[in-house]
Image (cartoon, rainbow, N blue to C red):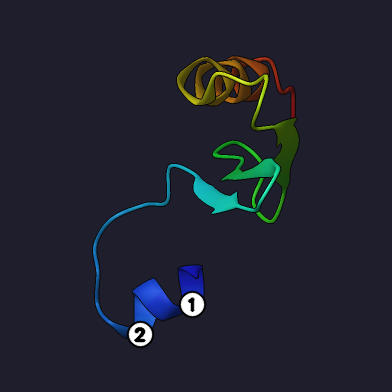
Amino acid sequence: KMKTMKSLGLNDSIEDILITLGKQYHILRPAEKINGIFIYYVLDNGRANLALARRKVSDVESKFVM
């Protein structure tokens, strides 16, 4: 996705990528502090709150140490 954005000349960054399956949400978030590292969460969509999960992924990333 990042290569595609670059080839299209998009001057923006990926906050996160959401994949929805029948029973799951998958959230992928590129780490801002460590190039090439992603945070990957898998959630049960019957029990998960997507907005809170995205917030939690952001919180986890903020604790990364280089």
Give the position of the C terminus as an image quadrant: top right
**5 over 52 or under it: above or below:** below
Provide the residue designation for mark 2.
7
Q: Which of the 4 quarters of the picture holds residue 26?
A: top right
Measured as percent of width and height from the top left, residue 62 is found at: 59, 18
Name the mark on residue 3.
Answer: 1
Q: Which of the 4 quarters of the picture holds residue 15?
A: top left
Write the residue at 52% across / 26% down: 50
Q: Which of the 4 quarters of the picture holds residue 61?
A: top right
Whether residue 7 sits left or right of residue 19 in the image: it is left
Query: CA gap, disc 1 to disc 2?
Result: 6 Å
Write the residue at 69% across / 56% down: 36
Write the residue at 68% across / 15% down: 63
* Front one among 28 and 9: 28
Measured as percent of width and height from the top left, residue 34 is found at: 67, 42
Measured as percent of width and height from the top left, residue 64 is found at: 71, 23
Disc 1 to disc 2: CB gap under 8 Å: yes
* Front one among 32 and 56: 56
Q: Amino acid at mark 2?
A: Ser
**24 over 35 or under it: above or below:** above
Q: Amino acid at mark 1?
A: Lys
Whether residue 58 sits left or right of residue 23 in the image: it is left
Total label count? 2
Name the mark on residue 11.
Answer: none
The local secondary structure at tag 2 comes to: helix
